[in-house]
Amino acid sequence: MKRNWSWMWFSLSLALAGCGTTRSVTKAPAAPPNKMQAQLGDFSALGQASLSNDGLQLVVAGDGLFKSGHTYLSHVGAKTVDALAAVLGKYPADSVTVTVYTDNSGGDAENLKVSQRRADHIKKELVKQGVSVDHVTALGKGDADPVVDNTTEEGRAQNRRAKFLITTTS
């Protein structure tokens, strides 16, 4: 029996040629490094700093910023906000949203008013230290969004806080 080698070579070459046309798998581009990663260390010195999808979040205990029942910054609180302004000054493209919370002592309306006044005082101090007024937003949230139960003094102390959300445009 005589074989037709040319026919077999032709079939084999077609089969092998088909192997080369398999779909190539492309990897999705790597996510760009978080722009805020480099700033994390600077902000960590001021409180609990972490990265989120929204930007860099810094949480500072409210008792470290304000005297109990008052809306003006304590001496230590003013120094903390001044240090925050200095860090923000290193990153002029950054904007900050200051959100201040209270515990649930007192009425809802009073807590909202106190927290807004505290947020406004922080904004005023940041602007006084050179942060652009257009880059600072102040929000008072009262006793909304507690991080822990308000039934103990320790829990209420944790709920009295200022949260700074730092975002960048560059």
Image (cartoon, helix red, strand yellow):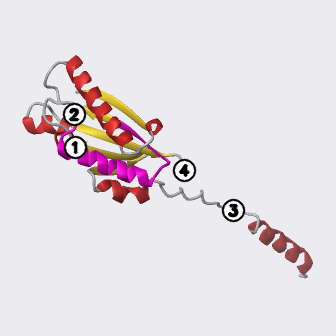
Residue that label 1 marks: 77
Q: Specify which label sits upstream in the sequence, 2 or 1.
A: 2
Residue at 53% of width from left, 46% of height from top?
169
Q: Residue at point 70% right, 60% down?
A: 23
Return the x and y of residue 41 as percentages of the image width and height.
34, 59
Left or right: 73 in relation to 51: left
Secondary structure of the residue carrying tag 2 is: loop
Q: Nearer the viewer, mark 3 or mark 1?
A: 1
Q: Nearer the viewer, mark 2 or mark 3?
A: 2
Residue nearest the observer in this picture, 154 or 17: 154
Badge 2 is on which residue?
A: 72
Could you tell me how far apart the alpha carbons at marks 3 and 1 are, in whole angstroms?
Answer: 58 Å
Q: Is any part of residue 15 visible from this angle?
A: yes
Is 1 on the left-hand or right-hand side of 102? Answer: right
How far apart are the two marked residues, 2 and 3, measured between alpha carbons?
63 Å
* Nearer-the-camera pick, 81 or 36: 81
Dots 3 and 4: beta carbons under 8 Å?
Answer: no
Would you name the residue on which mark 3 appears?
24
Residue shown at 27% from the left, 38% from the top: 162
Q: Are marks 2 and 3 in contact (CB under 8 Å)?
A: no
Packing grade of label 3 (10 A; few <14, some 14-19, many >=20) is few
Q: CA distance from mark 2 to mark 4?
A: 33 Å
Q: x%, y% of residue 56? A: 39, 48
Q: Which residue is mark 4?
A: 170
Is mark 4 in CB contact (under 8 Å) with mark 1?
Answer: no
Left or right of residue 15: residue 57: left
Looking at the image, tell me whether mark 3 or mark 4 is earlier in sequence order: 3
Where 21 sits versus 43, above or below?
Answer: below
Cβ atoms at labels 2 and 4 below 8 Å apart: no
